[in-house]
């Protein structure tokens, strides 16, 4: 045997051993990373109260209190009143040194300050029926672990957030499966780590207790099964996504494009049947009880009536307008057109451009799906009015998938990941009103720079797609 052949054989043996070692350690590494992510999230719950956003917690807490008190199927209803509750009992405080009481009076040592009970009004639930069921289960678990069902405790925060942690995990797992399908297991594991420990996504759950991961996780798995051409399963999961959060509708245009370019009517029918089946099954008990009030509360009201501000501290085009005008009204006119109408026009133009560019670049290639969804979420974050700060995290999992598949767009993903941290921690560092009336100049400069960065990343993204088209020619 020649020396050259011997070296080749030895090299192949070493490669096989390395691959075998990687496979052996893969499960251990995956489980260790997963456990670390769960423990880290729970550990963050010991942070001081000022790090958390209590109002969303109290709203969700009010929903499960109402659900336990009146029954799950009474969650929805036309013109249902707000649910008012006391979340902190009255307290008598014995003064040891001169203190200003809540009534503005100065109390002397030995006197007693009567601190009244603290009340909160939770608006009727505005999430679809499957999330209503999950919230009801939270209430049952809270009643089991704390008969007094106190709000803003470690127990109540943990109960509210455990489903979010599980959704974060499923989202990261879905990203891992998709990336592994295209780029191999090592890339898939890296994608899993990047989403599982993505600060913006992680802190949205921990500090806010928000449920955005519910529909993001299910939407990712919908994409996974669509890319694998498992149409009924993909449709079922999309139906689940719609029954978790109304924002799942935003992925609809990208899915429509995906099926339209395939020109396969059978796949669309199977997908649609799966979606309709799961929606009917989940919503039927609520429909029989209160008609289609769940549609009114979860979808129509969410997109048309709630929080009519130009921006809800989202660092987008309307934050720049707010810094200049200090007016959050969506009905204020610019060149004779209301801000809300301008937002819809910009949204429409952005969507049209994105569809055209994706069609020119990808044609009917399936990898267009995650890219188009990422673009749609970016456009819906940057240009319409009434956008919440958290919506920036919707971009990240889909953009990450495209970054791995196409070995590009990493600067854009990194930029939005950094901005997302500022967005979901604004309640800690940006203690100003929605209209920025009491904001310091340094804060306004930072908000302006973050908003400009958000827009610049998007235009860089569009230019990059366009330049790739030119290179292909």
Image (cartoon, rainbow, N blue to C red):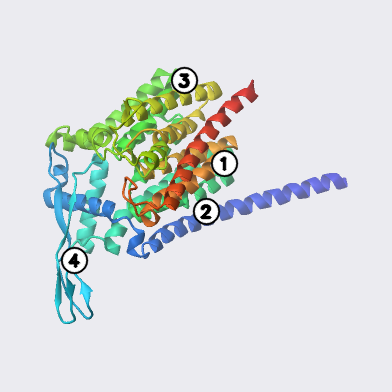
Q: Is residue 24 left or right of residue 310?
A: right
Where is residue 127 drawn, in percent x and y?
25, 41
SS for dot 4: loop
Quadrant of res 319: top left
**Residue at 36% over, 60% down:** 51
Residue under pointer 2: 27
Give how far apart the Cα atoms at labels 2 and 3 are.
38 Å
Residue under pointer 1: 410
**Residue at 61% over, 52% down:** 22
Q: Which labelled disc corresponds to residue 354?
A: none
- Nearest to N terminus: mark 1 or mark 3: 3
SS for dot 3: helix
Q: Which labelled disc corresponds to residue 102?
A: 4
Residue under pointer 3: 261
SS for dot 2: helix
Quarter of the C terminus within the rendering: top right
Give how far apart the Cα atoms at labels 1 and 4 are.
51 Å
- Nearest to N terminus: mark 2 or mark 1: 2
- Nearest to N terminus: mark 2 or mark 3: 2
């Amino acid at each position: 045997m020649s020396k050259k052949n011997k070296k080749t054989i030895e090299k192949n043996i070493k490669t096989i051993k390395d691959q075998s070692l990687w496979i052996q350690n893969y499960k251990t590494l995956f489980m260790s990373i997963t456990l670390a992510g769960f423990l880290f999230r729970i550990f963050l719950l010991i942070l001081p109260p000022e790090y958390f956003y209590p109002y969303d917690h109290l709203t969700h807490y009010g929903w499960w209190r109402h659900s336990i008190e009146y029954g799950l199927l009474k969650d929805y209803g036309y013109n249902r009143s707000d649910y008012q509750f006391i979340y902190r009992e009255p307290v008598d405080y014995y003064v040891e040194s001169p203190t200003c009481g809540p009534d503005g009076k100065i109390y002397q040592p030995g006197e007693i300050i009567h601190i009244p009970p603290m009340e909160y009004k939770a608006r009727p639930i505005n999430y679809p029926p499957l999330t209503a069921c999950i919230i009801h289960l939270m209430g049952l678990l809270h009643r089991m672990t704390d008969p007094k069902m106190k709000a803003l405790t470690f127990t109540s925060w943990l109960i509210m957030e455990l489903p979010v942690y599980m959704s974060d995990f499923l989202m990261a797992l879905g990203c891992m499966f998709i990336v592994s399908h295209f780029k191999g297991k090592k890339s898939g594991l890296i994608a899993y780590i990047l989403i599982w420990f993505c600060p913006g996504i992680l802190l949205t759950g921990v500090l806010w207790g928000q449920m955005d991961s519910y529909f993001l996780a299910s939407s990712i798995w919908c994409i996974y099964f669509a890319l694998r051409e498992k149409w009924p399963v993909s449709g079922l999961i999309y139906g689940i996504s719609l029954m978790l959060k109304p924002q799942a509708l935003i992925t609809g245009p990208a899915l429509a494009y995906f099926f339209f370019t395939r020109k396969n009517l059978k796949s669309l029918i199977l997908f649609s049947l799966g979606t309709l089946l799961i929606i009917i099954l989940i919503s039927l008990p609520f429909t029989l009880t209160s008609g289609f009030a769940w549609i009114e509360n979860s979808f129509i009201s969410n997109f048309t009536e709630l929080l009519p501000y130009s921006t809800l501290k989202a660092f987008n085009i309307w934050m720049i307008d707010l810094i200049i005008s200090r007016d959050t009204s969506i009905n204020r006119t610019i060149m004779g057109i209301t801000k809300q109408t301008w937002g819809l026009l910009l949204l429409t133009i952005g969507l049209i451009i994105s569809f055209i560019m994706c069609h020119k670049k990808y044609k009917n290639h399936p990898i267009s799906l995650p890219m188009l969804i990422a673009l749609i979420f970016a456009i819906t974050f940057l240009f319409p009015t009434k956008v919440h700060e958290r919506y920036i995290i919707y971009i990240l999992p889909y953009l990450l998938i495209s970054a791995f598949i196409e070995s590009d767009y990493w600067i854009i993903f990194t930029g939005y990941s950094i901005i997302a941290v500022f967005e979901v921690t604004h309640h800690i560092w940006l203690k100003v009103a929605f209209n920025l009336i009491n904001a310091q100049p340094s804060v306004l400069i930072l908000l302006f720079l973050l908003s400009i960065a958000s827009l610049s990343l998007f235009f860089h993204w569009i230019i990059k797609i366009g330049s790739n088209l030119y290179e292909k020619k």
